[in-house]
Image (cartoon, grey):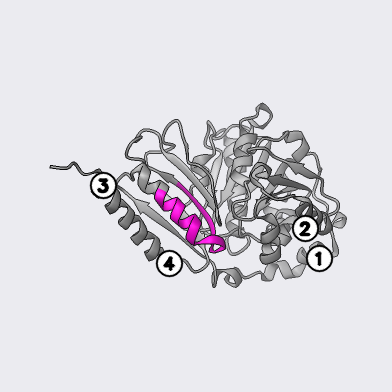
């Protein structure tokens, strides 16, 4: 049986950073990865470095809904390709869910679907929690509570960025899931053996709430419950963006959008460094300094910024970029 590990956690909690670190470890060389993103344009699969084509992007929707069937088909297809020698003979599968995904329907599918049941076994759930925004997220977002409660391992990320004492967050996590060890990841770095030694997933070790979520009600999940208030869209630019424009954009968003900016991530073609794309990340009011990839991960060299938000219109951000770009161009124009 090939173990399947579920990696979940709310928007911006560090799942992809953690996954990228794991895949650079020798023990994880034979891992197939399925990455699910909420929105029409996916980026995470381009930001996970892997030398073969056993990374699959599922960007048709959120795995907790109608595309559960897509997950089963993808897993079955991976097994067929493995048998045919089209992909390396992976020895484990890691599924990274969307930050908005309800984990219960996904877990139920992995535990009960007959199509994959003979060869794959659900072998643990890892949930990432952002030390900076985690406490507020748990108080505001019901999905994040579920993600914590179902976990076999809880990984607290971004501790180096947290200004306040984390005892309140750690206490909340312990109250929601007393059986899951609490681990710390520094910039995504963690010992893989600490994460994936839980053994086959056992709902009987979880709370009564988790066992109820994994019951028949999991089949009735409707994504529209959070679709109505949460929007996702992508800002796509063909022309390169000046570094100053990007800096001013991120500063403006951090200052004025606050908690309504649930997640921002992007790969940006910087005019001053066209051969090395910038990767940007932001969660609410916290933005990380851009990092530069050594090369473009694909032939698509457009700037793509994915935004998940409550109530921030796409047109406003588009207009903001245009205004900043025009201001930078005017300042940079040579004087006759």
User: Bounds of the magenta span?
Assistant: 248-266
Whole-number angstrom distance, CA of label 2 to CA of label 1: 8 Å
Disc on res. 313: 4
Disc on res. 331: 3
| Residue at position x 76%, y 42% in the image | 183
Whole-number angstrom distance, CA of label 3 to CA of label 1: 58 Å
Q: Is 63 or 326 nearer to us in this picture?
A: 326
Can residue 123 be seen in this snapshot?
A: no
Which residue is identified by label 1? Answer: 209
Mark 2 and mark 4 in contact? Answer it, CB < 8 Å.
no
Between disc 2 and disc 4, whose residue precedes? 2
Image vertical order of residue 275 relative to residue 33, above or below: above
Whole-number angstrom distance, CA of label 2 to CA of label 3: 52 Å
Mark 2 and mark 1 in contact? Answer it, CB < 8 Å.
yes
Q: Position of residue 191 (x, y in %)?
A: 73, 33
Q: Quadrant of residue 113?
A: bottom right
| Residue at position x 29%, y 46% in the image | 239
Q: Position of residue 245 (x, y in %)?
A: 36, 48
Which residue is identified by label 2? Answer: 149
Between disc 2 and disc 3, whose residue precedes? 2
Closer mark to the observer between disc 2 and disc 4: 4
Give the main secondary structure of the magenta stretch.
helix
């Amino acid at each position: 049986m090939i173990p399947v590990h579920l990696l979940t956690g709310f928007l911006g909690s560090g799942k992809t950073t953690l996954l990228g670190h794991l895949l650079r470890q020798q023990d994880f060389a034979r891992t197939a990865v399925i990455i699910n993103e909420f929105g029409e344009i996916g980026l995470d699969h381009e930001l996970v470095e892997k030398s073969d084509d056993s990374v699959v992007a599922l960007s048709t929707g959120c795995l907790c809904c109608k595309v559960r069937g897509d997950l089963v088909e993808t897993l079955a297809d991976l097994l067929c390709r493995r048998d045919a020698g089209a992909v390396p003979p992976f020895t484990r599968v890691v599924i990274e869910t969307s930050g908005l995904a309800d984990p219960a329907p996904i877990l139920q599918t992995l535990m009960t679907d007959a199509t994959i049941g003979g060869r794959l076994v659900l072998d643990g759930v890892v949930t990432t929690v952002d030390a900076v925004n985690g406490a507020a997220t748990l108080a505001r977002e019901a999905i994040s509570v579920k993600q914590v409660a179902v976990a076999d391992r809880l990984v607290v990320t971004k501790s180096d960025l947290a200004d306040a004492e984390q005892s309140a967050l750690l206490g909340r996590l312990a109250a929601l899931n007393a059986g899951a060890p609490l681990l710390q990841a520094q910039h995504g770095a963690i010992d893989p053996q600490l994460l994936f030694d839980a053994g086959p997933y056992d709902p009987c070790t979880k709370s009564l709430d988790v066992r109820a979520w994994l019951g028949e009600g999991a089949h009735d999940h409707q994504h529209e419950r959070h679709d109505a208030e949460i929007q996702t869209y992508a800002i796509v630019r063909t022309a390169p963006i000046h570094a100053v424009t990007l800096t001013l954009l991120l500063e403006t968003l951090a200052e004025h959008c606050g908690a309504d900016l649930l997640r921002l991530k992007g790969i940006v073609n910087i005019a001053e460094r066209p051969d090395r794309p910038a990767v940007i990340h932001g969660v609410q009011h916290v933005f990380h300094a851009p990092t530069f990839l050594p090369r473009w991960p694909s032939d698509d060299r457009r700037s793509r910024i994915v935004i998940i938000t409550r109530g921030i219109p796409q047109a406003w951000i588009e207009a903001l970029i245009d205004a900043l770009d025009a201001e930078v161009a005017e300042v940079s124009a040579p004087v006759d």
